[in-house]
Amino acid sequence: MLYYEDPYKKRIKAKILKKEDGKCLLDRTILYEGGGGQPADRGYIICNGKKESIEHLGELWHRCNCNPGEEIEIELDWDFRYYMMRSHTAEHTFFRFLQERGAELIKIALGEESSIMFKGDIGIEDVLEAEERTRELIKKGIAVKSFRISKEEVENYPELRIKKERIKGKKVRVVNIEGHDLSACKGIHVKNLKEIGDFAVTKFRRGKKKEVKFVVGDKAKEFHYSMSKTLRSAAWGENIEVEKFERVFHNVLMEKEIMSEALKSLSEEMDFEKENCKGVEVAYRIIPGAERKIIVRKMMEFTNSPKRIALFGDSISHSVSCAFSEDMKYLRDLAIETIKKLGGKGGGGDRFISGSTPDEKEFIERIKEEICKNI
Ligand SMILES: [Zn+2]
């Protein structure tokens, strides 16, 4: 296949040897039929002044509308192919670093944004370090070469990354990133890592099956720049130096956790105030930033006994809620009406409603009044 001999050939003349059911057998091709995680090439066939898209179906058979005897030319969608070649070589370079840290490859899918799925105990630090080292090797400009060995020779290369069960023929094609990685692969690669330009991991999904997504070239440059812009905007927006942002951010998260714990116990411990109206017990309370789950639970517990109503307001989120005992739930619509009259909105079930108003204090006062009138 010409794409192995010269992966940089963009256009060739070829002959149609045979044609069957709209498929042409060509004497040669520059279109990669796909495999090893690399998608099939996109390309064109030109005959009699017509240019149509063409697909390599394998073993030199191509889908085509030209006929035997006609002069044909095959043209590659070079931008797409070259991006794939760079992505594929970047994948080898990057994954070798991850493998050194214990990653086990599951699947590769190259594309505009390529994906590598793998197993193993790999963390954010490992991924970022592998990215950094990949970028260093790209800058250095390491040569990439390929050669073929027989299946028997495989044992002479203990460093070779290979899934033996996937090798079909007698020969194994080895891609060598000099001094860094040896991998059995049928895909198409660049001659020098420099051609990749730049490399960026755009996503890292953790879990049992992990996934990294990446881009190369200008896309990678743009990604690095746009992330740095986001970081600076976030840091400077809060008057924090970029260098200190990570530490400050961690502290904020930690404080948030402490605050949330404090609010939880506050919500748990704070008692509702109580008033009696015509024999009905009305409990009410305003707690800024209360833990909603705990409050709802307390309100439902309180109104489990008859002749009880519970009212609650949060002065930070401006949310309000009311709970009614079974015999008091006829007041539910009145509560929703009152929320609306105060310029808010609310809704919910039979015994529990929630909503928001601009002023939760006013809400508590008004609703106590209204309810008492209507009991
Ligand atoms: Zn490969």
Image: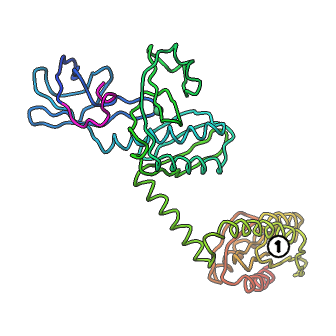
Residue 327 appears in the figure: no
Q: Quarter holding the C terminus?
A: bottom right
What stretch of residues is rendered in magenta? 1-12
> On the picture, is 338 further left or further right than 110?
right
Asked if residue 155 lies left or right of residue 320, the reply is left
Tell whether position 152 is magenta: no
Does residue 205 appear left or right of residue 36 in this picture? right
Q: Residue at x 44, y 59 (%)?
A: 222
Looking at the image, which is closer to me, 28 or 150?
150
Against 172, is 191 above or below? below
Residue drawn at point x = 51 percent, y = 16 percent: 153
Q: Secondary structure at mark 1?
A: strand
In terms of image quadrants, where is residue 269? bottom right
Q: In the visual, does 148 lie left or right of 365?
A: left
Q: Position of residue 51 (x, y in %)?
A: 16, 37
User: Which residue is identified by label 1?
Assistant: 310
Give whichever of 364, 260 is nearer the camera: 260
Q: Name the residue located 67 percent from the left edge and 79 percent from the top edge.
A: 357
Question: Dot 1, crowdedness within 10 Å: few (<14), some or many (≥20)?
Answer: many
Identify the image quadrant of residue 209. top right
**Amino acid type at image mark 1:** Ala
Question: CB at mark 1 closer than 8 A to ligand 1?
Answer: no
Q: Nearer the viewer, residue 192 or 266?
A: 192
